[in-house]
Amino acid sequence: MLAGTGLSLFSAHARIAGDAAALRQHRHTLWRPAAALFAFGALSTPVWPADFLRFHGVDIALAAFCLARHRTVLVGFTLALPVAFCTDLRMLDYEYRWNVNTLDYCGLWTLDGMLHHFLFNGFNPVVPWLAFVFHGMLLGRLRLPNTGLQRRMVVWSASVAVLTEILSLTLVALASGDLDLGAHSDTESMPPVPLYLIAAVGNATALIGACLALARRVGDARVLSALVHTGLLALTRCSAHVFVGFGTLETLGLLGKQCRGTAVLTSALFCLLAVGFAHGPANRLLRRLSRR
């Protein structure tokens, strides 16, 4: 969703002006990092099978075709993708090529395996995950600095997410004959059924609205600057959380063996280190390179 919001902000001037040449240049500009994301994700797959950068690269490359599309088209795509996934779910075997015991995907780099993995039953398949990007593009076309909009994003989106979770738990409990609302929810990411998508969109939209409101209220520009620098190093941070974060835990024998409190503590420590690195040595290095 953040990527989609960024796409709309990135192309806003050209889209509003109707500058076809500039929009075409924007697409070419976006395809290069999209290809880099795919390549980097593919290289990291042997170490991190759940890598999402490959899917992210494909999503950005496809969304680049829609920079100038009318919002009704984006709404249509956002709604059509979950419907397409549900249709596929009825016709195809979702567990095809999966070893459900080890979560290994067999024959990923064959043509058949790649198509199924990217379009249907991978960790973050284009159908329906591309809907998140389109929803983000719609958000990016709103007046995000508007305080009233930020408040509505938080209240309404959080309400939708909570109601969706309650509905999901209730439906699962009724279907299983167990009316215990502590039953397993139907808002898990695999398979990404519509209830999952709605809950995820609600949570993410509320969080984005809250961050926008918080940024407006925070008086210390240094705090915002540190977070901005961290956001600019998203690819570095994503890589570090796998190779440095998971690698350290595996070396210490803690990977997959932490209690909830320890997991929260290690996550918080990694976040603090990531902000410190991005706002410190990495930021100074980027400034030097940009000057040269």
Image: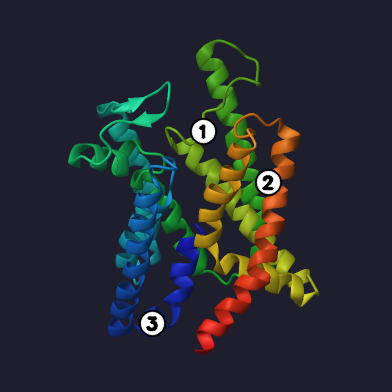
Q: Amino acid at mark 3?
A: Ala
Q: Are marks 2 and 3 in contact (CB under 8 Å)?
A: no
Q: Is residue 244 left or right of residue 197?
A: right
Query: Which residue carries the number 3 mark?
Result: 14
Q: Please say which color scheme the image uses.
A: rainbow
Give the Cα distance between marks 3 and 1: 38 Å
Residue that carries the numbered disc 2 in the rendered image: 267
Q: Is residue 148 visible?
A: no
Front-most of residues 105 and 193: 105
**Mark-to-mark CA distance, 2 and 3:** 40 Å
Of the two numbered discs 2 and 3 in the rendering, the one whose residue sits closer to the viewer: 2
Q: Position of residue 84 (x, y in %)?
A: 31, 41
Q: From this view, report whether residue 237 is shown above or below residue 85.
A: below
177 left or right of 88 in image: right
Residue 98 drawn above or below residue 205: above
Label 1: which residue?
188
Precedes in sequence: disc 1 or disc 2: 1
**Amino acid identity at mark 2:** Ser
Q: Quadrant of residue 13?
A: bottom left
Camera-nearest residue between 119 and 207:
119
Q: Position of residue 128 (x, y in %)?
A: 37, 44
Q: Name the residue located 44 percent from the left edge and 77 percent from the top edge.
A: 12
